[in-house]
Amino acid sequence: MRVASFNVNSIKARLPRVLEWLDDSSMDVVLLQEIKTVDADFPRLEFEDRGYQVETHGQKTYNGVAILSKHPIEDVRRGLPGDDADEQARYIQAVIQGLTVASIYLPNGNPVDAGPKYPYKLGWMARLRDHVRDTLLPAETPFVLGGDYNICPTDGDVYAPEKWAEDALCRPESRAAFRRLLNLGLTEAWAALHPGREHVYTYWDYVQGRWQKDEGLRIDHFLLSPQAADRLVACEVDKSPRAKEKASDHTPIWVEIADAPAQRQAA
DNA sequence: ATGACAATCAGAGATTGA
C-alpha cells in the first residue's frame, strides 16, 4: 500500500494541482495538511469522482488536515488528545485495511523567543509523544504517522544550517523532542532507507528563487511503528509537483508498505 | 532591518507561514 503526505497550502487554491498529481501517481492513501478550509467547503466530490473516500478535520483559514483513501476508512479520530482547549485542526487518524494512519500538521513554532507559539509547538510534540506511547504503541498494530512535522531533524536537512540554527524548525529543543518521539521505537522512513543522504528537501520557500536554487528544508516525514517498519519497502520524495505553476511550497513524500504476511498456521 | 511570495478574509491591508 502506498501512502503519501502532501502539505497543499490551501486545498481550494491547489485543487487542479492535487488532482493532476493524484491521476499521475498511484497512491492508495493521501494525507493532506493545510487544507485551510472548514469540512463543509472541502471539495470532496472531485476526489470521490476519482475513487477516493474523504475524511477531513478542517478549520477556517488556517491549518486543517484530511485523509484520502481508495480503500474503506474506519475508526476516524479527529484532534490530538491531551488538551480539550486546543482548537487548532492539526491531527486526524483512521484505520485503512488494518493500517492505522495519521495526518499530522505539527505547529511551526516561530517566533522562538516571544509569545505562545514555541511553547505551543513543544507542548504539541509532548502530547503527540504521549499519544504514541499510551495509545498507539500498546495496540501493537502497524501505524504510519505522516505529515508536515515542521522539524529539520539534522543540519543535513537544511540548505543553510547556520542561518536556521535558531529557528523553531532547527532549535535543539525541537530536534530533541523529535528524537524523543523516535526513541519510543518509531522508524523515520526516509532516514531508514536513505542513510547518509543529505540535502533532499520537501519544502522550498516561494521567495528568492529557493526552488530554482534547490535551497530547501526536509520537514515532511513518515514515522512508522515497528510493525509497519518491518513492512517498509520504499520511501521517496516526488519533486515534480513543486515545479508546476501555482505549486504548493511543499512537495509530496510517500512510503510503500508491503501487504501483511499471511497468518502462520498453528502447528 | 526589511522584504522577498502566497494564501486567507475581505473587499484594504493585516496576519500567517517556515
Image (cartoon, rainbow, N blue to C red):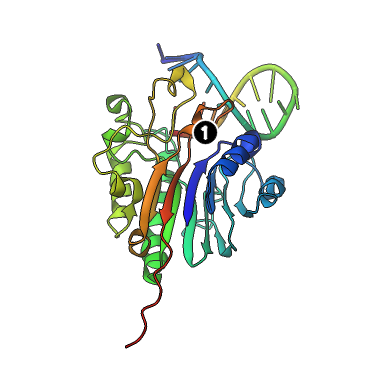
Relative image position of residue A82 (x, y in whole percent) = 46, 59
Residue A247 visible in the displayed image: yes
How many labels, in total? Answer: 1
Q: Is residue A115 placed above or below A130 in the rendered structure? A: above
Mark 1 packing: few (<14 Cα in 10 Å), some, or many (20+)? some
Q: Is residue A139 placed above or below A252 in the rendered structure? A: below
Relative image position of residue A156 (x, y in whole percent) = 27, 34
* Residue appearing at x 39%, y 24% in the figure: A214
Instruction: Identify which amino acid the numbered label 1 is placed on.
Output: Pro
| Nearer to me, A20 or B12 | A20
Q: Is residue A18 placed above or below A125 in the rendered structure? A: above
Q: Residue furthest bottom?
A: A267
Q: Is residue B17 left or right of residue B11?
A: left
Residue A34 visible in the displayed image: no
Indicate the chain on which mark 1 is placed.
Answer: A
Q: Quadrant of the C terminus of chain A?
A: bottom left
* Residue appearing at x 48%, y 40% in the figure: A252
Residue holding disc 1: A241
Relative image position of residue A193 (x, y in whole percent) = 30, 48
Relative image position of residue B6 (x, y in whole percent) = 58, 26
* Residue appearing at x 39%, y 39% in the figure: A219
Q: Is residue A159 placed above or below A91 in the rendered structure? A: above
* Residue appearing at x 36%, y 79% in the figure: A264
Q: Give the SS element for disc 1.
A: helix
| Nearer to me, A228 or A110 | A228
Residue B18, image quadrant: top left
| Nearer to me, A26 or A196 | A26
